[in-house]
Amino acid sequence: MLDKSVDYIKNIIGDFKPQIGIILGSGLGELADEYCLKSISYADIPGFEASTVSGHKGKLVFAEINNKKVVMMQGRFHYYEGHSIQKVVFPVKVMKKLGVETLIVTNAAGGVNPNFRPSDLMIITDHINYMGVNPLIGPNDDSMGTRFPDMSEIYTPEYVELVEKIGDHLGIDLQEGVYMALTGPSYETPAEVRMAKIIGADAVGMSTVPESIVAAWAGIKVIGISCICNSAAGVSTAGLSHEDVIRAANVAKDKFKTLVKEVIKKL
Ligand code: HPA
């Protein structure tokens, strides 16, 4: 299926060879609209499925940003949608086959760290996989990565530093921290958020970790950026809603785009 999918895409994009992949999280999809040279609907790509979440479109978008060739996922597959974990990470394998060397993975997240405010951007330094599943379970494709891959530096430290520097230079305040993924789709309870804090998480969300594991396995360098859309349950007294998450992402989207464009320039 992977080869079929890659062949289908290559037939459409010809000799366009993206070096950078970007997975655009909830409310952060505008970058793809702005720079789109060519797009392919997920529904048309063998091995992909249509996206079911509002605020997420379902397109693979090819673009040139700051002279770099980029492939963007406008919308991603979530485990909570009922997709198998293999489906969730399939696009990352496709990106690898298309030539992607660096993946910028983004998401909307809840802030566990009490210093975080809605619409803050957080550079992911590490993650906790609390989804109860690992996307590498099953036969290993040795041509892509090893059976027992090292995960000590998933979020390439030199790129964490680079993004920090760029943030400084642009005057964009950036937080930094550990992202913990749960399956969702229910938001966490206050007790779960207290646990997340105790075990070392700064933010919680429902994505990113499966894709980052597969990217690291396949030798792709990963940069992770969370948009902190709300204080996680119990951290503040406000209740949680998807609408509030999208609203906070909207407030953050301009600085997010500015940051990502500058990061692309420097890669
Ligand atoms: N928890 C999990 N996922 C999220 C949250 C949250 O509080 N906000 C945005 N995505």
Image (spheres, grey):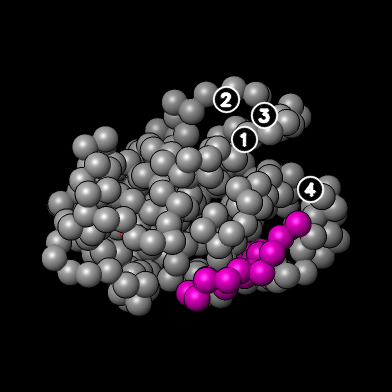
The kind of residue on which mark 4 rests is Leu
**Mark 1 CB near ligand 1 (8 Å cut):** no
Q: Could you classify mark 1 by the number of other residues whose Cα lies within 10 Å: few (under 14), some (14-19), or many (20 or more)?
A: many
- Identify the disc placed on residue 2: 4
Q: Are marks 2 and 1 in contact (CB under 8 Å)?
A: yes
The kind of residue on which mark 2 rests is Pro
Q: Nearer the viewer, mark 4 or mark 1?
A: 1
Q: Secondary structure at mark 3?
A: loop
Q: Earlier in the sequence, mark 2 or mark 1?
A: 1
Please name the predominant secondary structure of the magenta segment in the image.
loop
Q: Earlier in the sequence, mark 3 or mark 4?
A: 4
The answer to which quarter of the image holds residue 164 is top left
* Residue 241 falls within the magenta-colored stretch: no
**Residue segment shown in magenta:** 47-65
**Mark 4 CB near ligand 1 (8 Å cut):** no
Residue occupied by mark 1? 136
Residue occupied by mark 3? 145
- Identify the disc placed on residue 47: none
Could you tell me residue 152's position as x and y percent? Answer: 44, 26
